[in-house]
Amino acid sequence: DIQMTQSPSSLSASVGDRVTITCQASQDIDNLLSWYQQKPGKAPKLLIYDASNLETGVPSRFSGSGSGTDFTFTIRSLQPEDIATYYCQQYYSLPELTFGGGTKVEMK
Amino acid sequence: QVQLVESGGGVVQPGGSLRLSCAGSGFTFNSFSMHWVRQAPGRGLEWVAFIRFDGQNTFYAESVKGRFTMSRDNSKNTLYLEMNGLRVEDTAVYYCAKDPHYYDARGYFHQWGQGTLVTVSS
């Protein structure tokens, strides 16, 4: 199984701050990584796929980068509506798919 | 637009069974592979099962293999998850999710249903 280690598990930031979340795979997964946003009581929402491609309709303040084993998700300027938990997910080993543990983003 | 609507959740005793359904609309259901993903209360996301667009192949997480069966009826645009031998640790919100690619699966989750809660408790 490919393990995904996401950090930090939580963070607190102010409106306008740059927020960065990292995700590390236990083996090379090329660029086969996606990022999701989940607000309380709601289903997750796809933000980024193939490590750096922004899903249609997602604001451009969200971005992703990385390849191999190390990946980064960035919110360029945090907005109040970005308060949520974010998950990375690898699909290199389809159909065995795994998520990172999640990062809860809170407002300072 | 794409809609996925799960149903069938509820409370069941350990060892019991339950069948979840997921009705799809707004897309060509028989052209897309589908997944089940679950989330235990206060926990992260866990992939559960995958089925090819034509229903010919299914794959399961080790945690549910041998107890859960995923199927689909493309004539009814509906996905199913038959859950047997339920355990307390199966308590979770179960989401169905659509793969993004026609025919050949990519493995990430393009759209999600709203989820249905399964509680396993005596």
Image (cartoon, rainbow, N blue to C red):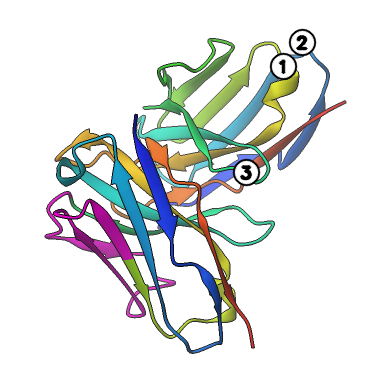
Mark 3 and mark 1 on one chain: yes
Q: Earlier in the sequence, mark 2 or mark 1?
A: 2
The image shows residue A96 at horizontal and vertical percentages of 34, 55
Secondary structure beneath dot 2 equals: loop
Residue where numbered disc 2 is placed: A16
Query: For the residue marked with disc 1, what is the amino acid?
Result: Leu
Q: Residue at horizontal 50%, vertical 18%?
A: A58
Q: Nearer the viewer, residue B56 or A24?
A: B56
Q: Hey, what amino acid is under mark 3? A: Gly
**Residue for badge 1:** A78
* Apparent side of residue A30 relative to residue A26 in the rendered image (left or right): left
CB of mark 2 within 8 Å of CB of mark 3? Answer: no
In the image, is residue B67 part of the stretch drawn in magenta? Answer: yes
The label on residue A102 is 3
Q: Secondary structure at mark 1?
A: loop
> Spatial distance from mark 2 to mark 3, Cα to Cα?
22 Å
Mark nearer the viewer, 3 or 1:
1
**Which of the chains bears the disc numbered 3?**
A
Q: Tell me whether circle 3 and circle 1 mark residues in contact (CB < 8 Å).
A: no
Q: Is residue A89 visible?
A: yes
Name the amino acid type tagged 2.
Answer: Gly
Question: How many neighbours does mark 3 have within 10 angstroms: few (below 14), some (14-19), or many (20 or more)?
Answer: many
| Quadrant including the N terminus of chain B | top left
Task: Say whether disc 2 or disc 3 marks the residue closer to the N-terminus.
Answer: 2
State which quarter of the image contains the C terminus of chain B.
bottom right
Q: Are marks 2 and 1 in contact (CB under 8 Å)?
A: yes
Seen at 22% across and 51% down, the residue is: B77
Q: Is residue B72 left or right of residue A91?
A: left
How packed mark 2 is, by other alpha carbons closer than 10 Å (few <14, some 14-19, many 20 or more), is few
Q: Which residues are magenta?
A: B53-80
Could you give the CA–CA distance between mark 2 and mark 1, rounded to whole angstroms? 5 Å
Q: Are marks 2 and 1 on the same chain?
A: yes
